[in-house]
Amino acid sequence: MKISGALLLVTALFSVSSNAAVHKMTLKKVPETPSQKMQRYSQTGEYLTQKYFGNSRYMQEANQNFLPDSMGGVEHGVPLSNYMNAQYFGEISLGTPPQTFSVIFDTGSSNLWVPSTHCTSIACFLHRRYDSTQSKTFKSNGTEFAIRYGTGSLEGIISNDILTVGDIAVKNQDFGESVKEPGLTFAFGRFDGIFGLGYDTISVKGVVPPFYHMVNRNLVDEPIFSFWLNDADKDNSIGGELVFGGADKSHFTGDIHWAPVRRKGYWEVELEKVVFDGEDVEMDDTGAAIDTGSSLLAVPTIVADLINKQIGAKKNFAGQYIIDCEKVPSLPDFSLQFNGKLFTLTGSEYILKAQNQCISAFMGLDIPEPLGPIWIIGDVFLRKFYTIYDLGNNQVGFADSRN
């Protein structure tokens, strides 16, 4: 959600495994204003509603189950910028000569789209726009698409051009040019577009996602990508890192714990148990979507209400749960169990600070059957745990993040 501000350019050197290249990348740090702090999480509910309610193709295939296997090595690194612990984004380019865009790398969706010069919405004029007439490698497709949001539809056309991500060039990549962007969700975004990393089963219009092309064309050594998300409150210089082809061992410690993907769509694993304030709750047929495109923890409304009541959080005028910051150090731990292992967040980790206020990360979102119940596990969790997404073996790996 894009607003002007001074840019602090920082050079970061990411080390990977011994058989992989080392990439020296430039990152941007974007300072925030007080008003931006309060709005940082206000659009989360609308965006999640679209992702988890609006995909009929995945709803039709929601009962498929898949099992895990093994893992491979590392290859290509892409740096991420962290906007107020609410949006992590990096740069890609489209066309020849390259046109640069900031995108959210989103494991909760599967399409790549950026604003178009054909767009007349306010949001498009506040962001960089793709101009097909300026690209020598552009190929027309023209298929129309629409992604529905609470305030309207994001509409556009499918186009084809060369995509560059880090040092990877993906030729003949279909992507969306948005010609209409609704409401304020995208107008105030720090990002221009979305880079979907979910399964192809949830891709709008059946467009082949970029990572599938990388795998099928042998542009990466292994069908794996991984995320490290840094905490802006601890270190403002580095936003994070996305690695295509494996995992960056310098950003996690200990062993990797694997959980099988239960359905090919979102990166959804089985949520077996929740532990909160000394109470264990066994979960029945409940999924957990590991979602890099979400800031918060979206859980069933009744659960969100109970948790927030127990910690003393109350809703404000924007629908956010606010808690007295002095209570945070005494809050109980919250744990989620995936494939037999508990992953724990402390009170200070699931409470977010914004303009001298403390916001609970637990928001209510009810996802009906056959897709639900699903809990959406966003960046609040992913800042603490390094995650690896193994497309070849349909599993998600978790390790302690090194921040």
Image (cartoon, rainbow, N blue to C red):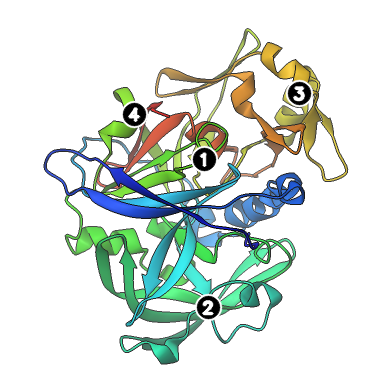
What residue would you read off at disc 3?
325
Q: Kindly report the distance in space between the C-alpha atoms of the residues bearing marks 3 and 2.
A: 41 Å
Q: The residue under label 2 is which amino acid type?
A: Arg
Q: Amino acid at mark 3?
A: Cys
Spatial CA distance of label 1 from label 2 is 28 Å
Q: CA distance from mark 3 to mark 1?
A: 22 Å
Circle 3/circle 2 CB separation < 8 Å: no
Q: Earlier in the sequence, mark 4 or mark 1?
A: 1
The residue carrying pointer 1 sits among few (fewer than 14), some (14 to 19) or many (20 or more) residues within 10 Å by Cα, namely: some
Asked whether 280 or 318 is in front, the reply is: 318
The picture places residue 71, in percent across and down from the top left corner, at 21, 37
Q: Position of residue 365 (x, y in %)?
A: 69, 42
* Residue kind at label 4, given as amino acid type: Phe
Q: Which of 49 and 98 lies nearest the eye of the viewer? A: 98
Mark 1: which secondary structure? loop
Residue 288 located left or right of residue 353: left
For mark 4, does the 10 Å Cα neighbourhood hold few (<14), some (14 to 19), or many (20 or more) residues? Answer: many
Asked if residue 23 can be seen in this view, the reply is: yes
Q: Which residue is mark 2?
A: 129
The Cα–Cα distance between marks 4 and 3, rounded to whole angstroms, is 29 Å
Distance from label 4 to label 1 (Cα)? 19 Å
Find the residue positioned furthest to the right.
317
Residue contact between numbered discs 3 and 1, judged by CB atoms under 8 Å: no
The quadrant of the picture occupied by the C terminus is: top left
Q: Where does label 4 land, which residue?
A: 252
Mark number, residue 236: 1
Q: Are marks 1 and 2 in contact (CB under 8 Å)?
A: no
Task: Tell me what residue is drawn at x 63 percent, y 22 percent.
Answer: 348
Q: Quadrant of residue 182?
A: bottom right
The residue tagged with tag 3: helix, strand or loop? helix
